[in-house]
Amino acid sequence: MRIRIRRQENSVSKPYWQEFSYEKKNDQTIAGMLEELNYLDDLKDISGNSAPRIHWEQSCLQGMCGGCAMVINNTPALACETFLRDIKKDTVVLEPLRKFPVVTDLIVDRSVIDTYLKKEGAFIEEYKGAAFSEYYHMYQAGKCLKCGLCLEVCPNFSCGSSFYGAAFANDCYLIAMRSGTRDTALTRAYKEHFEKGCSKSLSCMDICPMKIPTLASISKMNRVR
Ligand code: SF4
Ligand code: FES
């Protein structure tokens, strides 16, 4: 099969496309395929020219860290969770997430997610205990990988905008429940940087690899104030 990758040497260089050929294995993932290509002593593109190693981000290779998020055949997804058997086309097109600045090749800078949380003081100062009835949803919301896929598909999010997106909303819910927060700076930040801008497209829930029910976090936050 043909692997077409949008490459970029660094954050200021011009992007370009490079193609590789790869013998398809149904049980291989996109992540495994990229590893195989990079293991080659002399990586060559489809025309036989030497090519630089493909830069991409990963840690767990089991859908637990969110590092390998990228755009695969026009759909944002985790590379380690996407199997070649599910790709019906002869060509796989890989691109970096489009809503974040490119660092190199398929690696993007998602630090904005943490920056928002730090800026709004989204951390627990004192654990005051949460109601037992919240435990199940807290567990669900706590599974967020900060992979950025929800932001990638959100029609209201752009990097640097005042709308912070689903990952922020879920963390606000978690902190409000754990710290017994009522009408504080954090809930005001939630209102300003999420509630005001969310148009309830819910594409975030559809794409989320952890299937976090963000809509439930939103409805629960409505009760916090
Ligand atoms: S809410 Fe889901 S899609 Fe968004 S950052 Fe967390 S794990 Fe990723
Ligand atoms: S490498 Fe960790 S989620 Fe894919």
Image (cartoon, rainbow, N blue to C red):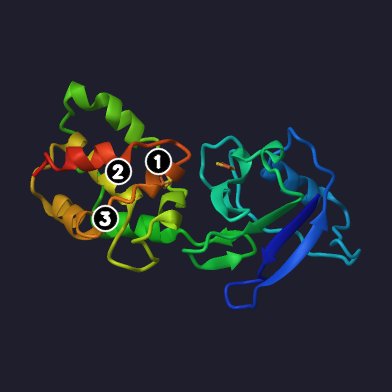
Q: Position of residue 54 (x, y in %)?
A: 72, 58
Q: Label 3: how many residues lie within 10 Å, few (<14), some (14-19) or many (20+)?
A: some
Q: Amino acid at mark 1?
A: Cys
- Dot 1 falls on a residue whose secondary structure is loop
Disc 1 CB within 8 Å of nearest ligand 1 atom: yes
Q: What is the spatial separation of the Cα atoms under label 3 and label 1, in whole angstroms?
A: 19 Å
- Dot 2 falls on a residue whose secondary structure is helix
Q: CB under 8 Å between callouts 2 and 3?
A: no
The mark that comes first in sequence, 3 or 1, is 1
**Is residue 39 in sight in this rendering?**
yes
Residue wearing tag 1: 144
Residue wearing tag 3: 198
Q: Check the image and name the residue furthest to the right.
A: 48
Q: Amino acid at mark 3?
A: Cys
Disc 2 CB within 8 Å of nearest ligand 1 atom: yes
Residue at position x 73%, y 59% in the image: 4
- Looking at the image, residue 210 lies above or below residue 56: above
Q: CB under 8 Å between callouts 1 and 2?
A: yes
**Residue 218 quadrant:** top left
Q: Answer left or right for 112 relative to 36.
A: left
| Dot label at residue 170 | 2
